[in-house]
Image (cartoon, helix red, strand yellow):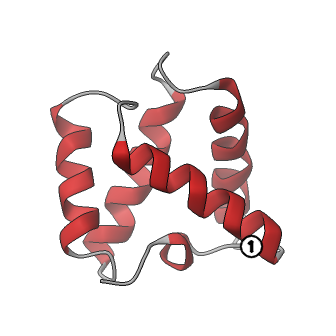
Amino acid sequence: MAGSDELERWRGVLARLQRGPAPRGEDFELCREVMAAAPDTDAGREAARRLLEGAMADAATTIADAQQVMRLLKAAGRGEVDIADLLPPR
């Protein structure tokens, strides 16, 4: 299970990605809109995951954020964190 400090770090990374500019593209803009409109839904969680995965392929993502995104995605894959826990309530 991820610690509270780590969860806060990951919330910050996800918030930065939601503001942009990375990842760039129409698909990611749509992800941002879905996350803003419906963060507490399956679609909101999937949009957040796509945004995180897209950040790994975008050169505009900082190295520090990319490192945190990788840690987050690995933890989510192992079931140690639920991406829904990182999304702000609506």
Quarter of the picture containing the C terminus is: bottom left
Q: Residue at the location (68% across, 25% down)?
A: 63
Label count reads 1
- Give the residue type that dot 1 points to: Glu
Asked if residue 28 is positioned above or below residue 90 in the image, the reply reads: above
Q: Tell me residue 65's x, y (percent).
A: 64, 37
Report the side of 13 relative to 35 (left or right): right
Instruction: Name the spot of residue 83 as percent of width and height, x first.
Output: 53, 69
Q: Which residue is mark 1?
A: 80
Q: Secondary structure at mark 1?
A: loop
Could you tell me residue 69's position as x and y percent? 63, 45
Figure quadrant of the N terminus: bottom right
Instruction: Report which quarter residue 27 is drawn in.
Output: top left
Q: Which residue: 47% across, 20% down?
A: 60
The quarter of the displayed image where residue 28 is located: top left
Residue 2 can be seen in this image: no
Q: Residue at x 68, y 42 (%)?
A: 70
> Is 81 rendered above or below residue 14?
below
* Residue at (63% x, 52% y) in the render: 73
